[in-house]
Amino acid sequence: MIKLYGVPQSRAVRCLWMVGETGQPYELIPVATVNGKIADPELLRINPNNKMPALVDGDVRIFESLAINIYLAEKYAPALKASSPAEAGTIAQWSLWAANEIEMASQDWASHSFVRPPEQRDAAIAATAKAKIDRALAILDGALKGRDWLVGNRFTVADVNVASVCYRLLQYPDLANFPNVKRWFEACWARPAAQHARKLREG
Ligand SMILES: N[C@@H](CCC(=O)N[C@@H](CS)C(=O)NCC(=O)O)C(=O)O
């Protein structure tokens, strides 16, 4: 059975969404921590970076949440995987774009807007992050103009990866400024597997 190491309150939520899309049975293995730091020899053997999530599926071991999702699509969700080299490149493009262009800004914005206790928030960091998010969302909005999904004419792992990296933007106040993103983002997160992953994370 697929084993996913991590907790839903981490980037593992991205893989919980994707494994839900596959319909495959899986086991979620929470990683051990000591004083809030990961201290789990089993995780370390799978991911030498000592970070979650990580996946074991038979002989296959993969770390990096977005790569795990691409693997799950490749192996278990034919409709969500690339159907040509061009699609494979475009799925990689959007996955790497999300990780590089939006992930840190989204985390900084959330962290300094509502995640941290008020006395630990820095309004300047939140404002800088918000400006970066707005720039990224304008690019995404352009890419989604006249289309429902990022790659091909169907929901793919690219949509799971980008929408799940943008998890914190479920609370973004200015999403309506990017109507194509808003429409797409709502459609992505309305999927049963996305709703389930959110429930696992938020309770
Ligand atoms: N790029 C990696 C990042 C993984 C990562 O940073 N995971 C965090 C939890 S969301 C973690 O394990 N942090 C523990 C630590 O840094 O000690 C991915 O997407 O999987």
Image: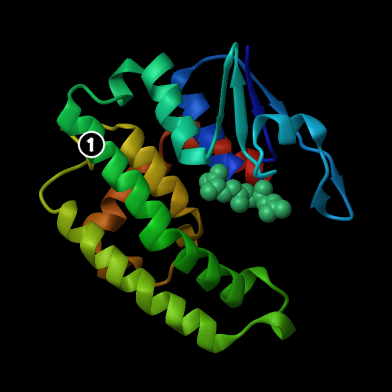
Q: Is residue 144 left or right of residue 201?
A: left
Q: Position of residue 64 (x, y in %)?
A: 52, 40
Q: Which residue sits at x=42%, y=43%?
A: 189
User: Is 154 or 56 nearer to us in this picture?
Assistant: 56
Colour mapping: rainbow
Q: Is residue 49 left or right of residue 155?
A: right
Residue 18, relative to residue 122: is it above or below?
above
Could you say where residue 154 lies in the image, as x and y percent from the top left?
22, 30
Q: How many marks?
A: 1
Furthest-left residue in this view: 146
Q: Nearer the viewer, residue 117 or 47?
A: 47
Residue at screen point 52% across, 88% down: 124
Q: Would residue 106 be found to the left or right of residue 118 on screen?
A: left
**Residue 74, can we see it?**
yes
Residue 77 or residue 90, whichever sits in front: 90
| Quadrant in the picture for residue 187 | top left
Q: Residue furthest bottom?
A: 124
Residue type at mark 1 is Gly
SS for callout 1: helix
Q: Is residue 174 visible?
A: no
Instruction: Check disc 1: other Cα within 10 Å, few if <14, some if 14-19, many if 20+.
Output: few
The residue at the point 60 percent across, 40 percent down is 12
Q: Quadrant of the N terminus?
A: top right
- Residue at point 51%, 80% (across, down): 126
Which of the 4 quarters of the picture holds residue 71? top left
Residue 182 lies, in percent from the top left, at: 30, 57
Quadrant in the picture for the C terminus: top right
Q: Which residue is mark 1?
A: 89
Q: Is residue 2 left or right of residue 188?
A: right
Image spot of residue 153 (x, y percent): 16, 32
